Amino acid sequence: MKNVTDSFVSLGDWPYAGSFAFNTDILATNPINLSVVLGVLIFFGKGVLSDLLDNRKQKILSSIRNSEELRAKAIEQLEKARARLRKVEIEADKFRVNGYSEIEREKGNLINSTYENLQRLENYKNEAIQFEQQRTINQVRQRVFQQALQEALETLNSCLNSELHLRTISANIVMLGVMKEITD
């Protein structure tokens, strides 16, 4: 521990650098040791360094080749996707056009069927009106005929004797039978 504290104490004894100068003493700067160490490093490190650089170069080249292959595959897939997109767009346009024409066709069919239904309903309405008119006319005829017959009978009953009365009734019965056959 004393050596450590002595080294700090001795730092205070160092002279301050006043100016910058080269040390030309060969033994003090130790260039021989440095050149030997550098020579050994260059001699033995050259192979290791060249191997490292060659490995790195090979990795970079293989990465570039892989990247080029991936790029080529990506371009190929992109072209295929674009072709599929164009095909799908064409089909979508066809469906859109066919869809619009189908909608128009269905619209026309719906309008036609609605018109036909309206015509049918109009015919049913007209037939019902004619039936009711005919029935009403027949009812009015029957009432008028019954009233006329009643008035005629009342007139005959008041004016006629019993023999004439019986002949008139027989004639009227025959006429009623004929009229009934006509109306049926």
Image: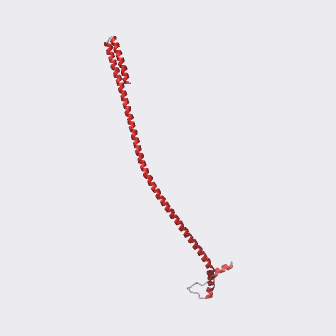
Residue 114 occupies quadrant: top left
Q: Is residue 173 left or right of residue 15?
A: left
Q: For the C terminus, which image quadrant? A: top left
Q: For the N terminus, which image quadrant? A: bottom right
Question: Residue 165: where, in percent of width, then height?
Answer: 34, 13
Up/down of 24 relative to 104, above or below = below
The residue positioned 36% from the left and 28% from the top of the image is 134
The residue positioned 39% from the left and 36% from the top of the image is 121
Up/down of 81 relative to 52, above or below = above
The residue positioned 38% from the left and 32% from the top of the image is 127
Visible in this render: residue 12? no
Residue 149 occupies quadrant: top left
Q: Residue furthest right?
A: 1
Question: Residue 180: where, in percent of width, then height?
Answer: 37, 22
The residue positioned 48% from the left and 60% from the top of the image is 83
Question: Residue 17: where, in percent of width, then height?
Answer: 57, 84
